[in-house]
Image: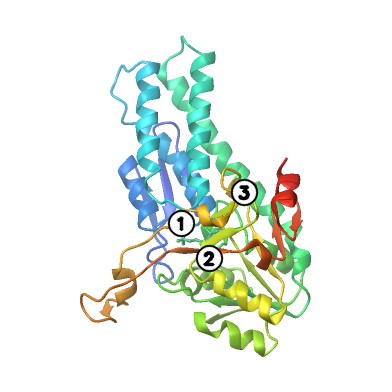
Amino acid sequence: MAFETLEWIGGIDGCLELIDQRILPGRFEKLQCKTVEQVFDAIKTLAVRGAPAIGVAAGYGVCVAMQALPPRSNLTAAAEHLEKNAAYLATSRPTAVNLFWALDRMKDLATRFISENSDVGVDAFLQALLDEAHAICREDKQMCKAIGVNGEKFIKENSGILTHCNAGALATAGQGTALSPMYEAHRLGRKFKVYADETRPLLQGSRLTAWELTQAGIDVTVVCDNVAATLMKQGKVSAVITGADRIAANGDAANKIGTCGVSILAAEFGIPFYVAAPSSTFDLNIKTGDEIPIEERDPAEVTFFGGNNVAPEGVKVYNPAFDVTEAKNITAIITERGVINNPCYQSVFEHLK
Ligand code: MRU
C-alpha cells in the first residue's frame, strides 16, 4: 500500500503512529500515541478503526502502557500493570472481537514469558511484548494478502461490486479484508466497478473506502445507503463484499450498521453476498449472532452533520454502530485459509480446526 495505516516507531521506548481517520479525506495527518489514554481515545473516537486495525492498535497500546511502569518495578509488578491496562483498553469498543483477541495474545505472552524467565530484567519483558505486538501486525498483513488471493476469483471481468463501510487498508495493517480481493483483481488487470455505500452516520464508505480505492486507481462510485436496491434492480451489482467485526460459530456476522439490510436485498435479488475476514474475527465462544454485543454510539453522530444540526434539539436517537447479517444470507466467508461456502456450525468448525 502507498500508506501505513498504523505502525510502531522506534524500540521499547517508541510510540504508536497512525493515520487520523477522523479527518480523512480532507486532511491526511498522522497521530502519535505516547500514552495508553491516547491509544484508548484513538480507538474510541475512530481515529483508528476497523476490526483488525483495532486489534493491532491494542497490541501496541499494551506496549505504550508498559512505558508508564514505575522505575525499578519487578516482573510481578509489570504483569499486574499489564493486566490493569489491558482491562482498560478492552473497554474502548465492545463489538470487534479482534480487540479482545489481541489483548488476550499479549496477556498469554506475558504469562509464558514470566513462567520461563524469572530472573531477567523488565526491559527483556517489554521487548518480548513489543515482539508479540509486531507479530500481530505482521500476521495481519499476511492474512489480508491471503484473503485477497482467496477472494479475487469472485470479482469477475466487467462486474460491479457493492461494499459497505470500510474494510480496506485503512481498517487493517495490510491491504484490507473486503477490499483485498479488489486489490488483487486490479493487480491482475481485471476491469470492474466498485459501488461504495456512503455508510451513515460516520461515512466510512464515502470518506475512507472511496479515498483509498481512488488512491489505488480502482473505479469507485459513491452512493447513498438507500441506493443499493436501485443498483441491484438495475443489474449493476454482481456481488456484495463486506468485512466483519465478529463472526459467531454458526457464521452469523456482525458488521457496520446497514450491512444486514444489504444482505437481505442481495438475497432478494439473487446476488452473492461475501464476507471477508481473518480467522481472528471468529468468536467460537458465541453460538449465534444474537450474542454479539452491539455498540451504541453518541446521538450527536446522527443529529449533527458537517457541523450542522439536522434533527430537532433533544430528539430521541437510536444509534447502533453494527448489525448482524444472518449466515443464511451469506454465500461464503473468505478467510486467509480459504473459503467457507454456505457458512454454518459445521463448515465454520471444519474450516478453523
Ligand atoms: O465503526 P468502524 O468504522 O470500526 O466499523 C468498521 C466495520 O464495520 C468494518 O467493516 C469491519 O470492522 C471490518 S474491517 C476489516
The alpha-carbon separation of the residues under discs 1 and 2 comes to 9 Å
Q: Secondary structure at mark 1?
A: loop
Q: CA distance from mark 2 to mark 3?
A: 16 Å
Q: Is mark 2 within 8 Å of ligand 1?
A: yes
- Dot in front, 2 or 3: 2
Asked whether the beta carbons under mark 1 and mark 2 sit within 8 Å of each other, the answer is yes
The residue singled out by tag 3 in the image is 141
Q: Marks 3 and 2: in contact by CB < 8 Å?
A: no
Mark on residue 59?
none
Which residue type does callout 3 highlight?
Lys
* Residue highlighted by disc 2: 166
Q: Is residue 336 above or below residue 156?
A: above
Q: Dot 3: within a 10 Å radius of its alpha carbon, few (fewer than 14), some, or many (20 or more) residues? A: some
Point out residue 124 in the picture as x, y percentages from the top left corner: 47, 20
The residue type indicated by label 2 comes to Asn
Q: Residue furthest left?
A: 313
Q: Residue at x 59, y 52 (%)?
A: 248
Instruction: Give the labeled residue for mark 1.
Output: 49
Foreground: 197 or 340? 340
Residue 174 vs 304, above or below: the answer is above
The crowding category of the residue bearing disc 1, from other C-alpha atoms within 10 Å (few below 14, some 14 to 19, many at least 20), is many
Task: Kindly tell me whether mark 1's CB lies below 8 Å from ligand 1.
Answer: yes
Return the x and y of residue 40 as percentages of the image width and height. Answer: 35, 47
Quarter occupied by the C terminus: top right
